[in-house]
C-alpha cells in the first residue's frame, strides 16, 4: 500500500449548499447526441414515448437530472428556433455545419425538447443564438416559450402547447470567443449586455441569465465579462476539457492508453481546481457577495473519436479512467460550491464523456454514469469541509494527489463521503476524523481490474457499482481501505 491518507470532516463547520444544478446535463445537436441517442421518432423497433427512447429516458430519470442544456454548444449559435416548430414535414432540413456537415432535419425542436424535459423530470437551460441570430430572434424565442398570452403564445398553442413553459436558465450565446462569433472579450461583453437586455421573463417569473464565459485559463475574458456585463447577468460560464497527450486537437485514445495516459488525464482533471480558483478570484473583485455564479457548463474528457466513427461526431468510449475524472471534478466543485452553482458535463448521450452510449436499439451505461448515480446524495446537500493530507501519486511527468474526496450532509440528514484513489496500483488507507461519529457506515465502490475497463453492448456490466465493506469505525475514526483505481461513496449513520 502507498503512504496513508488522513482526513478531517468539519461537520461542525458546514459550508455552502452543493447545488443540484452541478448535475446539469448537456445535449447538443451533434452526432448521435440527440438523433438516435434520445430521439428515435416513430421507429417501431425501439420502444419510445412521443419519439424519445424509453430505455435512455428511464436511465436519465434514475440520475435525477435536474436541468438539460440545449441545443448546443456551437450548434446553438447557428440555431434558428423558428425552423424547429410547426409541422415536422414542413421544417427546413439544414446542414449541421459545425458537426460533421450532416443534415439537421429540425425534427427535435422546442416542443420536442420540452417533451424530453417532461419525461426526464428536468428543467430547461436554453442556449440562445448570439452568434448569427439577432436580439429580436432571441427575445421572440423567449416569448414563444414563456408568454401566457399574445400572438406568440397563440402560435405555441396552435403548435400543441397552450400553457407557457418555464425557462429558468438561459445562456446568452456560447463560446463567443470561438464558434460563437470569434469575438474579443470587451466586444463580447458589450454584445452580451445588449442581448441579455432582451431576455425578459414574464411577470412573477425569473430567468437566470448565463454569459458565455472563458475558455480554460482565459482570465482576461472573465475580467472583461465581469467588469462590463455583470450587472446584466446572473452567471458566467467556464469551459474546460481534459485533453491528454498534449492538448488540442484531441488525439489521445479513449481506451487504448497506458498508465501514463491515466496519470495525464487525471492531472488534467485536477487542473479544474486551479482554474476555478483563479476565475473565482477575478469574480470576487467585482462581485464579493457572490451573486453571480460560475457555471462550468462544459467539462469532461475529450479524446480522439473512436476508430471507425465519424470524425465530426465526437463519439468516444468511456472507461474507469473517466469515472475518476468525473469524481475528481465533482469533488473539486464541492470545494468551490460557494461560487460554482452549476456545471454540465459534456455530453449526456453518445458524445464525449457521455453517461450513456447507444447503437440502434442497444444501450449501455458508462462508468461516468455510475459515478453520477453514486453522487446523487450530493444534490442540494450541505458541503462539509474535508481536509485531506494525502501523498502524491506520480507517473512520469505527472503528479496528482493520490486521494480525492468530498463530504456532504445530505438532505436525508446523513453524512455522505466520496473518496477516489487515483493510484492505479496501490491501496490507500484513509483515516478520517469526524465530529459526532457515527455508529455505522455502509458504502459502494466502482472499480475494475484494468485501468481502461469499460462497458460494451455485449459486456455492459464490466464496470458497475458493488457493495463496499472496506470502511469501519475504529476508535472514533473512520478507517477506509481504498483499493487502487476506485471510487467509493460512503454513508454514515
Ligand atoms: O461539447 C462539444 C463542443 O465543445 C461544444 O459545442 C462547444 O461549446 C465546445 O467547444
Image: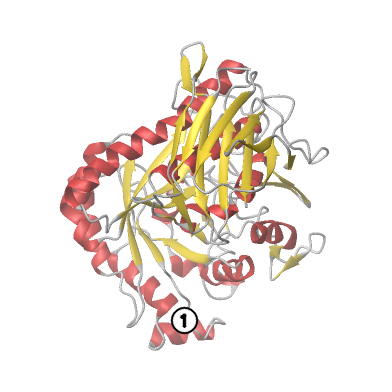
Any part of residue 333 in sight: yes
> What percent of the width, then of the height, locates residue 369?
64, 46
The picture quadrant where one finds residue 280 is top left
Residue at (56, 47) in percent of width and height: 437
Q: Is residue 92 left or right of residue 271?
A: right
Could you say which quadrant of the image residue 452 lies in?
top right
Is 465 or 208 nearer to us in this picture?
465
Q: Looking at this view, is 288 or 245 the one in front?
A: 288
User: What percent of the width, then of the height, locates residue 98?
Assistant: 47, 45
What is the quadrant of the N terminus in the image?
A: top right
Ligand 1 placement by image quarter: top left
The extreme top residue here reads: 396
Provide residue 201's location: percent of width, then percent of height.
33, 75
SS category of the residue bearing label 1: loop
Residue pictured at 64% horizontal, 30% vertical: 482
| Residue neighbourhood size for the residue with mark 1, other residues' Cα within 10 Å, grouped as few (<14), some (14–19), many (≥20) | some
Residue at 22 percent of width and 47 percent of height = 284
The answer to whether residue 476 is above or below residue 75 is above
Residue occupied by mark 1: 164
Amino acid at each position: 500500500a502507498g503512504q496513508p491518507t488522513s482526513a478531517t470532516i468539519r461537520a461542525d463547520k458546514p459550508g455552502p449548499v452543493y447545488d443540484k444544478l452541478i448535475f446539469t446535463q448537456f445535449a447538443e445537436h451533434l452526432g448521435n447526441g440527440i438523433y438516435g441517442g434520445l430521439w428515435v421518432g416513430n421507429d417501431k423497433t425501439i420502444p419510445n414515448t412521443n419519439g424519445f427512447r424509453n430505455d435512455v429516458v428511464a436511465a436519465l430519470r434514475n440520475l435525477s437530472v435536474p436541468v438539460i442544456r440545449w441545443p448546443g454548444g456551437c450548434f446553438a449559435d447557428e440555431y434558428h428556433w423558428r425552423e424547429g416548430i410547426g409541422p415536422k414535414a414542413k421544417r427546413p432540413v439544414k446542414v449541421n455545419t459545425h458537426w460533421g456537415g450532416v443534415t439537421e432535419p429540425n425534427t427535435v425542436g422546442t416542443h420536442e425538447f420540452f417533451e424530453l424535459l417532461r419525461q426526464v423530470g428536468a428543467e430547461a437551460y436554453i442556449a440562445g443564438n448570439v452568434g448569427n441570430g439577432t436580439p429580436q430572434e432571441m427575445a421572440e424565442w423567449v416569448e414563444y416559450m414563456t408568454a401566457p398570452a399574445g400572438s406568440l403564445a397563440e402560435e405555441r398553442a396552435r403548435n400543441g402547447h397552450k400553457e407557457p413553459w418555464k425557462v429558468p436558465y438561459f445562456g446568452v450565446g456560447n463560446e463567443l470567443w470561438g464558434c460563437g462569433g470569434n469575438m474579443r472579450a470587451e466586444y463580447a461583453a458589450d454584445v452580451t449586455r445588449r442581448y441579455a437586455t432582451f431576455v425578459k421573463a414574464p411577470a412573477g417569473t425569473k430567468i437566470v441569465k448565463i454569459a458565455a464565459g472563458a475558455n480554460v485559463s482565459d482570465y482576461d475574458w472573465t475580467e472583461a465579462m465581469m467588469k462590463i456585463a455583470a450587472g446584466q447577468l446572473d452567471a458566467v460560464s467556464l469551459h474546460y476539457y481534459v485533453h491528454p497527450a498534449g492538448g488540442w486537437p484531441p488525439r489521445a485514445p479513449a481506451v487504448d492508453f497506458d498508465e501514463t495516459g491515466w496519470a495525464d488525464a487525471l492531472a488534467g482533471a485536477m487542473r479544474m481546481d486551479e482554474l476555478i480558483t483563479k476565475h473565482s478570484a477575478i469574480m470576487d473583485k467585482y462581485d464579493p457577495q457572490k451573486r453571480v455564479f460560475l457555471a462550468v457548463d462544459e467539462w469532461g474528457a475529450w479524446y480522439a473519436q473512436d476508430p471507425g466513427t465519424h470524425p465530426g461526431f465526437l463519439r468516444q468510449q468511456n472507461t474507469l479512467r473517466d469515472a475518476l475524472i468525473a469524481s475528481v471534478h465533482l469533488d473539486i466543485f464541492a470545494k468551490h460550491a460557494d461560487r460554482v452553482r452549476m456545471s454540465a458535463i459534456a455530453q449526456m448521450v453518445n458524445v464525449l464523456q457521455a453517461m450513456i452510449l447507444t447503437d440502434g436499439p442497444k444501450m449501455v451505461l458508462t462508468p461516468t454514469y455510475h459515478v453520477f448515480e453514486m453522487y446523487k446524495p450530493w444534490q442540494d446537500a450541505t458541503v462539509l469541509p474535508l481536509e485531506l493530507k494525502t501523498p502524491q501519486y506520480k507517473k512520469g511527468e505527472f503528479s496528482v494527489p493520490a486521494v480525492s474526496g468530498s463530504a456532504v450532509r445530505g438532505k436525508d440528514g446523513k453524512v455522505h463521503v466520496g473518496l477516489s484513489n487515483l493510484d492505479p496500483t496501490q491501496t490507500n488507507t484513509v483515516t478520517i476524523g469526524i465530529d459526532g461519529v457515527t455508529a455505522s457506515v455502509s458504502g459502494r465502490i466502482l472499480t475494475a481490474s484494468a485501468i481502461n475497463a469499460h462497458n460494451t453492448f455485449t459486456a455492459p456490466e464490466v464496470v458497475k457499482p458493488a457493495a463496499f465493506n472496506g470502511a469501519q469505525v475504529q476508535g472514533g475514526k473512520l478507517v477506509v481501505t481504498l483499493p487502487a483505481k476506485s471510487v467509493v461513496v460512503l454513508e454514515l449513520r
